Amino acid sequence: MSVTVVGSLNEDVLVTVGRLPGRGETVIGTSAVVAPGGKGANQAAAAGLLGPGVHMVGRVGADPAGDRQLAALADSRVNVTLVERTPGVPTGSATIAVEEGSGENLIVVVPGANAELRPEDADTHSVRRAAVVLLQLEIPLATVEAAARAATGTVVLTPAPPQPLPAGLLARVDVLVPNEHELAQLAGVLPAERSTADLAELARSVASCSVVVTLGARGALVVPETGPVLVQAPPRVTPVDTTGAGDCFCGALAQALARGADLLEAVRYAVCAAALSTTGPGARGALPDDGAVRALLPQVPAAEPVR
């Protein structure tokens, strides 16, 4: 049982605002906090807190920010021996504006050392032997493809930030996990309010593998390769900050799949973990452990079919 994450590590600057700015608009923030982040590292941290056997493959700069990212992952029980230092290139960074009250956010990412992660970095025993390999798109696409080729276990891909996905990569993905906006971009349609039935049609037009569409406060849409499409609602919580909730979902999904859960069981576990992650500040401020998730699982509603 193991999960290997191949992806990004960033240092986040979290700025709290009364409301998110519009294009060309300046708003005054009420606080600023520096915290560990990056989609890959966030997913690894979530998986590490939920269970053993989590490994991270990535790159940081030879700088203090890199030191902080490695220490934070180690504190989350993630093996970081395959995270390489990259001299002359800074650790990746992200600036995140978080709206008070709603917890909604805007994010700008500067890749830094993440852009230096090479295909050969992903061709490692940790990827080849993992029960689940968890991937995102904040690293070069060629490296994502190399990791998918090397994997012998279940491949889970978060297509974020969204970009066209080569057919060869999609053919190696077992579970694709976009949000609604990412799914629309992958399908080449304009963003719009869509029913779960319409989202399921889009999902099947994009990929032949299983697709899990994250729906924010509504939970997740499960579109399996075969069988009925289901909506899994989350438990009720009071959100403080939704930053990183999708990453927590993916880390929890990967950990559950690595334990042998079927897709619906894994999604049920993941929506519970993601809901708990929104109850504190930042991408990792409220990441739950396995005990906390299992304590809340009885409050997760049964999945409902999409008609």
Image: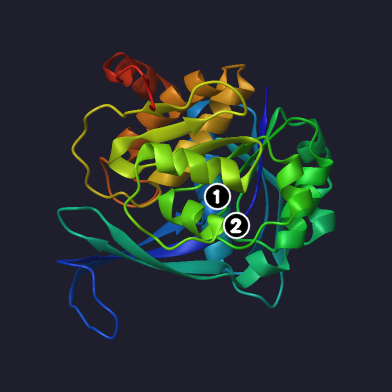
Instruction: Residue 100: give its label.
Output: none
Residue pictured at 60% horizontal, 72% vertical: 112
Q: In the picture, which quadrant includes the N terminus?
A: top right
- 65 vs 169, nearest the viewer: 169
| Residue 168 in the image, given as x and y percentages of width and height | 79, 50
Is 143 left, or right, of 267 in this rendering?
A: right
Mark 1 lies on residue: 41
**Few, some or many residues within 10 Å of mark 1 (<14, 14–19, 20+):** many
- 23 vs 118, nearest the viewer: 23
- 250 vs 22, nearest the viewer: 22
Please say if 3 is above or below 198.
Answer: above
Is 50 left, or right, of 291 in this rendering?
A: right
Separation (CA) of disc 2 from disc 1: 6 Å
| Residue 61 in the image, given as x and y percentages of width and height | 64, 68
Q: How many marks?
A: 2
Is 47 left, or right, of 173 in this rendering?
A: left
Instruction: Residue 8: give its label.
Output: 2
Residue pictured at 53% horizontal, 43% vertical: 203
> Which amino acid is tagged 1?
Ala
Please say if 232 is above or below 115.
Answer: above
Please say if 216 is above or below 48.
Answer: below
Please say if 34 is above or below 172.
Answer: below
Taking the view exactly as shown, the residue that stands out farthest to the front is: 307
> Which amino acid is tagged 2?
Ser
| Residue 301 in the image, given as x and y percentages of width and height | 29, 19
